[in-house]
Amino acid sequence: MAATARAFPALCPSSRSYKPGSQPQTKFRSQNGSLTLVQFGYLFVDAELDMQFRNITDERAGQILDHYLEVQGDDYVTFDATGALDGMGVEIVNRMETGRQALRWRYDGPPQITSVYPGVSTVSCKFIGYLYGS
């Protein structure tokens, strides 16, 4: 079954944090203190993206939960500058992995939904970027 891109709902988070990841490598240190690095490729892996949607309607929280339930198997998440990345400068968005380049985004666990009061919730989502191999 082929991997399917699933666009994240067009919701702007209250806050987000992005960590670009690192190149896979192993370090070897000898007894005299010299260091040898063995790199396993040139692409960055294990990028992290955390988003929080504060005080949104339960309907919007449901959109995020429905999206989480849709992303199964080899499916992955993509992000748009008019949705989850809205409000970020174009300089940062152009440097971020949006799920359309080398990395594929997956949920790093289910979204956490906190009920603030009836009809209003806060949702936290965590994503991890991985390299997709066929």
Image (spheres, helix red, strand yellow):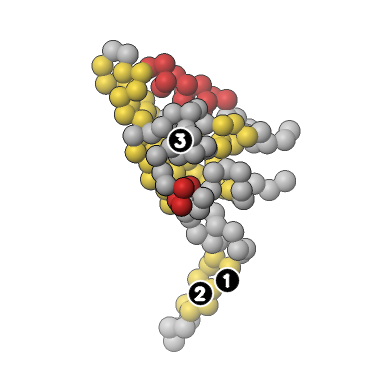
Marks 2, 1: nearer the viewer: 1
Residue tagged 3: 84
Relative to 26, residue 85 above or below: above
Kind of residue at badge 3: Ala
Task: Give the residue at the far front of this rendering.
Answer: 90
Marks 1, 3: nearer the viewer: 3
Mark 1 or mark 3: whose residue is earlier in sequence:
1
Residue tagged 1: 38
| Quarter-of-image position of residue 55 | top left
Residue 120 x, y percent position in the rendering: 31, 18
Kind of residue at badge 1: Val
Residue at 41% in and 44% down: 88
Identify the disc placed on residue 67: none
Q: Do labels 2 and 1 touch, CB within 8 Å?
A: yes
Count the marks.
Answer: 3
Identify the element where label 3 is drawn: loop
Q: What separation in Å lies between label 1 and label 3 (alpha carbons)?
A: 36 Å
Identify the element where label 1 is drawn: strand
